[in-house]
Amino acid sequence: MSTHARPLADWLAAQSDDALAVLFTRRGISAQVSWHDFFDAAESLLEPAAIERFLPRLTRAEAQALLESSSSRADADSRPAEDDLLARTALLRSDGTPYPEVADALATRQLEPAAAEHPVAPSTDIDAAHAAERAFTVVLALADVLLTAAETPLALLSTGALSATERRRLAERSILDDTADLDALISFALDAGLLHASDRTLTLTARGDTWLRLPGIERWTALAESFRTHLAPALRTSSGGWIAPSLWADAHPWDPNWPAVSAELEHRAALLGLTTASGEPAWARPLRLTGIADVDALRTLLPVEVDRIFLQNDLTAIAPGPLVPAMDLRLRRLAHRESATQASSYRFTAESLTLAFAEGETEESVLAFLGQISLTGVPQPLRYLVAQSAQRHGLIRVATDPDTGRTTVASSDPHLIDTMGVDQSLRPLGLVREGDHLTTKVGRDTVFWALTDARYPASAVDAEGNDTRALRTRITETPPIDSPDADERFAELIARLRAAQGADADAAWLDRELENAVRRRAALIVEVGMPDGSTRELTLEVTGLGGGRLRGRDRAADVERTLPVRSIRSTRPAED
């Protein structure tokens, strides 16, 4: 047990609840830690392992201040701000010197010279144009990721990374050539609350669904602001921006993992068009200095979004530029996107229209929408395909039997019932023939989408036989992006520490020292108060504690002694 834990425990007990919450947060303490009192807290904070875990979190300025405090005794009035912060994280004592346990940890540490801060130069026009194109591409690619997750949640490995199957699926749909950037896209989405990770899956959130309908420049702004917000505190400035990128790699000099983290952050900043090889684009400078991006400077380099398309006789649609996101989303419900560049192409098929009808579209709504956005009208072949698909839609009806709760699959075409009953791709549904229809215990929505994916003209109906929309996946309510408030997270722990804080801290600490000595069979120098008011020191090899009495062998007299605990004034370790 550390001999320095007592003064730290007293200091902790004197702090406000807010200050303790900040300390525990900075030191990475779990709110579920099993501390009983402030003595437990002090001992844990001074454990060498706990100190070694925390030192890598220090910024360069904090690490420098800690090294200086260990080599000289700073005057309290001239102590730098970093010293006050270090004291609030239980590394420095009240006189500004580190606790001995901290000093021991510092004995093997040093700091290399600080990196030079290079002025951030403005990007060249060519690099700025490339950065704008890169940002535009990332926004489109992330939209692909979210739309894929909306169809089917993305599977994660136990490590939290995307599975190889999902990477292939996303690579096939994404307009990014480098599939390694998928990790950055997922990070952008998680930080911004567009996706939610739970039960080893990534699902679209309500915020993500809203983001998909935003104009392109607003999509980028949301990602850039989220990136800024989630930068490490060591990289942030009081104005809401971030420090010069040339200093990022040097922000945490004692963290062996920081160079890789810093390199990844620089890569993400480049993906978002916030940095370039030659410097900083015009729209990023205000964001770095003030926390507010100049979106007008970026908008001038982005392709203009269009709200009209060309419909062609070969059942394709050509967008002469990037479509307005809301329009693109609806068009992709009706057709398969074949290419995704500034001029995208879409192809209408019976399958794509069947899926659109399954999601609530009708023949009238499809033709009205296409007529509204087409610069060339709706070609007759496309009208015929829409009408034919609408006619076939609903040939198979999927409902829930109110009496049994089982899903029923019925059709006016008995050949379809026979075909579905022997279709091997539908075997996982466990379809069973009952009279002129099929039944299964699998839920209605799942059965409906399985039939639709197998290209059967199915429709989901309610108890009254009316068409209803079947959900493929459910949008997740957007969870809080930031961690819960520190005061709330540590409220229960702090209350427990306060409740265990007795009126007589000296007696509580003495009991703790004695119990620890008994466990270790340690030798103590015990100061005992005598009946005449004098004191006497005894060196005891303690053997037991109970009933308010301490037992041990007196080294000097070589006899067993039993001392009332109330007569013990103080203890200290005996030298061997």
Image: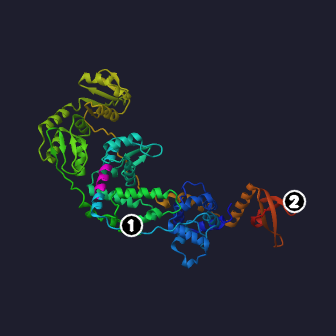
Question: Looking at the image, is 276 positioned above or below residue 473?
Answer: below
User: Which residue occupies 49% across, 68% down?
Assistant: 114
Measured in 3D between alpha carbons, the distance from the residue under mark 2 to the one under mark 1, in whole angstroms, is: 70 Å
Q: Mark 2 and mark 1 in contact? Answer it, CB < 8 Å.
A: no
Q: How many residues crowd around disc 2 within 10 Å: few (fewer than 14), some, or many (20 or more)? A: few
On the image, numbered disc 1 is attached to which residue? Answer: 240
Q: Nearer the viewer, residue 445 or 463?
A: 445
Q: Say which quadrant the C terminus sits in.
A: bottom right
Is residue 478 found inside the magenta-colored segment of the image?
A: no
Q: Where residue 443 appears, x then y in whole percent?
A: 36, 33
Q: Is residue 517 left or right of residue 62?
A: right
Magenta stretch: helix, strand or loop mostly:
helix
Q: Residue furthest top?
A: 435
Question: Looking at the image, is 4 positioned above or below residue 400?
Answer: below
Give, as a three-letter code, the residue at label 1: Gly
Q: Is residue 356 visible?
A: yes
Q: Is residue 153 visible?
A: no
Question: Looking at the image, is 80 positioned above or below residue 522?
Answer: below
Q: Say which quadrant the N terminus sits in.
A: bottom right
Q: Which residues are magenta?
A: 132-142
User: Which residue occupies 18% across, 51% down?
Assistant: 307
SS class, disc 1:
loop
Is residue 135 found inside the magenta-colored segment of the image?
A: yes
Give, as a three-letter code, the residue at label 2: Val
Of badges 2 and 1, the one in the foreground is 1
On the image, numbered disc 2 is attached to which residue? Answer: 559
Q: Where residue 143 appears, x then y in whole percent?
A: 31, 49
Q: Nearer the viewer, residue 200 or 400?
A: 200
**Sequence-wise first label, 2 or 1:** 1
